Image (spheres, rainbow, N blue to C red):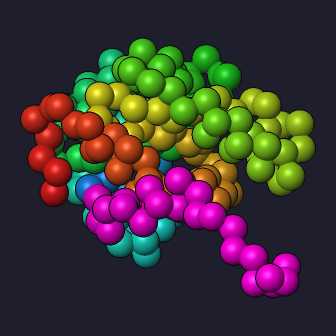
Amino acid sequence: MTFQEFELPRSPAQDHRDQAPESARIAVLTMSDTRTHEDDRSGQIIRETLGWRGFEVVAYEIVPDDPDRIREVLMMWIADPGVDAVITNGGTGISSRDSTYEVVAALLDKRLDGFGELFRMLSWQEVGAAAMLSRATGGAAGDTAVFCLPGSSNAVRLAMEKLIGPELGHVIHELRKHRVSTKRDG
């Protein structure tokens, strides 16, 4: 057998990706005191990228950087059997108005630390040391995947193209695999 004929075994991750759902229902939340549906470029990038990958956007809202309002919307979507994942943008920085991270961290049952680490590593290549200012995070709230992105359109594009887009189906598959909640498997 030559080197070219040698076949590497499939990784378990590839097997899981193959079992991932071809579609899923996603809610998109933009945190901003100034953006509107007409000029929310980051929210548009998220929705377009999801559509290109065959995912259905079932809800989209813009809320002010208000922790109570953010928590209210997130809890509603996390409890909704028609929502498999939530992707937010905005409010992940360190200014006094940035509160998304605190709200989401309190709702997560399991964190995907690697998401934030990889996001900041990839961001480093684009913005240098400023990447450390992002508190992008992800995880699971019950059996709902939650990803929190910065509000920057470039950051959103990076996360959607390099991280969330390629793995969202896999993440949803993992959350559904041993599902015990009342959410439907769609």
**Residue 71 or 180: which is nearer the viewer?**
180
**Which residue occupies the extreme right position in the image?**
128
Q: Quadrant of the C terminus?
A: bottom left
Q: Position of residue 132 (x, y in %)?
A: 79, 31
Q: Position of residue 124 (x, y in %)?
A: 84, 45
Residue 52 occupies quadrant: bottom left
* Residue at the (43%, 47%) spot, across then down: 171
Q: Position of residue 149 (x, y in %)?
A: 56, 42
4 lies above or below 63:
below
* Residue at the (10%, 35%) spot, across then down: 182
| 59 with respect to 9 (left or right) | left
41 lies above or below 28:
below
| 179 with respect to 112 (left or right) | left
Q: Quadrant of the N terminus?
A: bottom right
| 8 with respect to 173 (left or right) | right
Asked whether residue 132 appears in the rendered view, the answer is yes
Examine the structure image and report whether residue 9 is included in the region drawn in magenta. Answer: yes
Examine the structure image and report whether residue 129 is included in the region drawn in magenta. Answer: no
Q: Position of residue 95 (x, y in %)?
A: 66, 22
Question: For the magenta stretch, what is the residue range?
Answer: 1-24
| 91 with respect to 73 (left or right) | right
* Residue at the (26%, 56%) spot, across then down: 25
